[in-house]
Amino acid sequence: MARYIGKEMSRVDGVAKVTGKAKYTAEFQMPNVAYGFVATSTIAKGTIRSIDTRDAEHAPGVVRVFTHLNAPKLGPNAKEDAPPRGNQPERDKSFRALQSDRIYFNQQPVALVIAETYEQARFASRLVKVDYTAEKHVTDTEAVRDQAKAPGQPPKPRGNPEQAMRAAPVKIEAEFRIPIEHHNPMEPHAAIAVWEGDKLTIFDKTQDVYGVRQHLTSRLGIPVESITVISPFVGGAFGSSLRPNYYPALTASVARELRRPVKLVYTRTHMFTGHGYRPHTIQKVALGAERSGKLTAMIHDAVHNTSSFEEFNDSTTGFTRQVYACPNLFAPTRVASTDLNTPTWMRAPGAVSGMFALECAMDELAYAAKIDPLELRLINYAEVDPESGRPWSSKALRECYRLGAEKFGWKNRKPEPRSMRDGRLLVGWGMATGVWGAFQRPASAKITFRSDGTANVQSATSDIGPGTYTVMTMIAAEYLGTTPEKVKFELGDTRFPRAPSQGGSQTTSSVGSAVHGAALAVTGKLLSLAKQQSGSPLSAAETGDVEMMDGRLRLKSDNSRSVPIAELMRRNNLNEITETFESRPSAERQKFATMAHGAQFVEVKVDPDVGNVRVTRAIEVTACGKIINPKASHSQEIGGVVWGIGMALQEATEIDHRYGRIMNPNLQHYHVPVNADIHEIETIFVEEDDKVVNPLGVKGMGELGMVGIPAAIANAVFHATGKRVRDLPITPDKLL
Amino acid sequence: MRPFRYLSSTDPSAAVQAVAQNQTARFLAGGTNILDLMKEDIERPTELVDITRLKLADIKTANGGVSIGALATNSATANHPFVRQNFPLLTQAIVAGASGQLRNMATNGGNLMQRTRCQYFYDIAMPCNKRDPGTGCGALQGINRIHAIFGHSDKCVATYPGDMANALYALDAVIRIRGADGQERTMPVLEFHRLPGDTPEKDNNLVHGELIIGIDIPKNNFASKSYYLKVRDRASYAFALVAVAVALEMNGSDIKQARIVLGSVAHKPWRSAEAEQAIVGKPATDDTFKAAAEAAMRGAKPLEHNAYKVELGKRSIVLALQRAMNGGAAA
């Protein structure tokens, strides 16, 4: 019987966060630190003809002005930049600042001013004068849509979708558009680089300390052993700190040049071009079905933009292959080059975009076939993975649908659009399905268990907000038989054992499994010590037979047979036991398809006169394996719903294509939901008992919470108004 | 930001003179707008004269009207019992704007001085005649969904973004101003803001160095039938796509007096004399309201991306008038 796992626990770092004790990257203080401020380009494509830094250099407090003419060179060099061979990792083609006179995107760094204070650096940055030779740029995905290419292997159809589509008695076809969106975490990106000889310590806001270290090795030409990356707290990232951004290498290289610590902090505006974004995505979806609603053909063709120097692909249509049982399918994702920075993963990457199109199309099919939208999903329920034919390790989606519909009162829905009202407001009910993977990657954790029952646990993962500190503390306390107060979990440091990036909703499955494994290793070590004692009550026990509990190592089947741990350690002259464990995905997983699922039901109220949409009720039921900490998990899913509301109704990065420039790089013009936009949200978990996915039975949930929401809202808006808005966001002007 | 001189004054004439003597000096009150603009290098004063210690924050009642100090905060004004009782339109308009924190800092005088929220004005790399005269207007052929449909010129299509002023236009407010010579003068609020014409860099008709010291609202009979409607992209903390301030005085079932002011459609709050004329003397029916809406929008000249404001404006006027008749409640 678990003491902590599955029970609500407040964040172990909560008090530190609300009292300011938790330090975020830019808050670390270094003696003699100099401040950097990035000056950016005003054209989208071309070359720098000349750059005049004299005024900036003479401004008060300025230490140095770096441009492509004098900035330290960053690797890899031309030779290393050759195409990868064999199974070498893909070379790091992410944008490198101040390396040449080429301009690849607007608001690209063209100078870095270093000064004694931040304001001095910012002021001087505006004195840098740049002359450009501009070239014709393209920043509108619509304009290059026809030139889009599928990266990697050309996608293969399943069955014969074209033929099946022609033969289908019921069909729909529609096009959906999602604008570029930016992550906008609260904390701005920042780095502080400190050199001691040829050793670098860098504080960085990142979701992946090991990834940053690898990136810096290549950029700075120094071995990984010389680099320490520290990132104890991250004020939200949502994917914006997964791929290497240009600023850590830039900061580290100028700090080396200047022989003093340098701090660089993005402004909100820098964040719109200083990291990636959700790409502009155009999707064509055609669905064919029998009159019964059974899908016979699915064609889901997505195009999104990438940069001119990297082929980023968010796999928009990836999950389309696994959602519904359908024998004929074609679901390519193609990317088109634009003169913008490279997109990146943004919460529920690909999935929320792809499922917006697919789940709106399913709603359109439901109306075409005159079948209830929920019923249509059930008719096409995938009992096994339609892509591989493998059984699911677990899949409680049917229960999610049932429970959500019951809680929401779905059976009272009148199907005709504009048929439900609340006074003068139009009421709409919509639903959608959500999916995400149940990923796991290799991860390591180290536990130092002391004879007084306290433990130190370390793994170089990150906590960008989901509550990783807390959940790892709970897992360690559970399996060390101690209390959470006695466990200290540390993360975000390359001196700790390797963990994967915190992305893709795989931290608890990966790092949690490692912590679990390390705790079992401590248990095993104690058992081996106990068995060395003559007459030990555990002499016949095997590792799996025993557990640690409140200072005793005991037989699970007979708790009375036990030994006191402190005494056992003392007798062996041990103050502490340290075990490091690397967990890996099991071979068993290969026999199954592993995914997390959810069902979303939303109510909107639309003002028929002025077009305002309010999401008055959202019920989200998700099945993502075992829930370790319900409190933080609900918080995650509520956050997912809120972001889904933002994506559906508000978020859009606006580009003036004449200039190829983002025109709303700030939070007054780029809208995300505020409290007044958020009404009733209920999140429910249908727990799955899944022994296959990993020892803890957990699946991804952070991304999942947002996946179906934009589609459910768009479907509800159609139900309320009779208007299909297929271009996000659904702003009032589109509903007049 | 650029280095600047800071002066704090407790003496109105010293403060006014300090600004008057320096063409690049500016007053600093709540700072919720000018400091942001300085950080972005849009405003480039060499000197800030802090006036927050001047005694200009009183809210006084006289003859059924109210005299509001320029340094009274938006919050204090909106929450004032007499204002709420007699000029609920002003309270509604103020609380429709910004956030609680900003309204606690923002002063009424500063709010009248609030600059546009045009994206091109905010980006110093982009052309903007308002920010840098002679550089052109980026929004004219660009992203102009939030821009003007009335009174714009080929030099500028920006809007005045505030809410409070829309109500002041409907309430016939008068601005009290102190000049560099120490003399006070008054100006009807209707004459305060300007249309862009060829000089969009000038938002209003103050002479450099003049200080707003107060706002007077005369007694009126609109309190029971007024409404402030703000349509925006999210429920709070967003500038209006279209706002409407309406106030009605009835004579039996006929409309005796009307005020109809549109916000975020022009370089200044747009009081529609046409709409008011269309309904005065008429019964307060939906047909009358629709006639007012049509009249208000007759002269609209939408840009590429803001044609929706014409229809949205009409619907908003009708809705606001209906709600005004309903005592402010949703019909």
Image: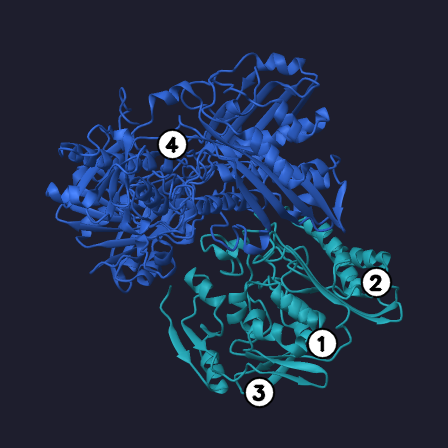
Chain colours: A blue, B cyan
The chain containing the residue under callout 2 comes to: B
* Left or right: A222 as drawn, with respect to A603: left
Q: CA distance from mark 3 to mark 4?
A: 65 Å
| Image location (x, y in percent) of residue A75 | 24, 36
Mark 3 secondary-structure assignment = loop
* Left or right: B124 as drawn, with respect to B85: left
Q: CA distance from mark 1 to mark 2?
A: 26 Å
* Left or right: A692 as drawn, with respect to A618: left
Is there a contact, CB below 8 Å, between mark 3 and mark 1?
no
Image mark for residue B183: 3
Query: In the figure, residue A99 lies in which quadrant?
Result: top left
Image mark for residue A310: 4
The chain containing the residue under callout 4 comes to: A
Q: Give the position of the N terminus of chain B as an image quadrant.
A: bottom left
Q: CA distance from mark 2 to mark 4?
A: 60 Å
Is there a contact, CB below 8 Å, between mark 1 and mark 4?
no
Q: Residues within 10 Å of mark 2 (few under 14, many from 20)?
A: many
Q: Residues within 10 Å of mark 4 (few under 14, many from 20)?
A: some
Q: CA distance from mark 3 to mark 2?
A: 40 Å
Q: CA distance from mark 1 to mark 4?
A: 62 Å
Tag 3 and tag 1 share a subunit: yes
Q: Amino acid at mark 2?
A: Ala
Image mark for residue B86: 1
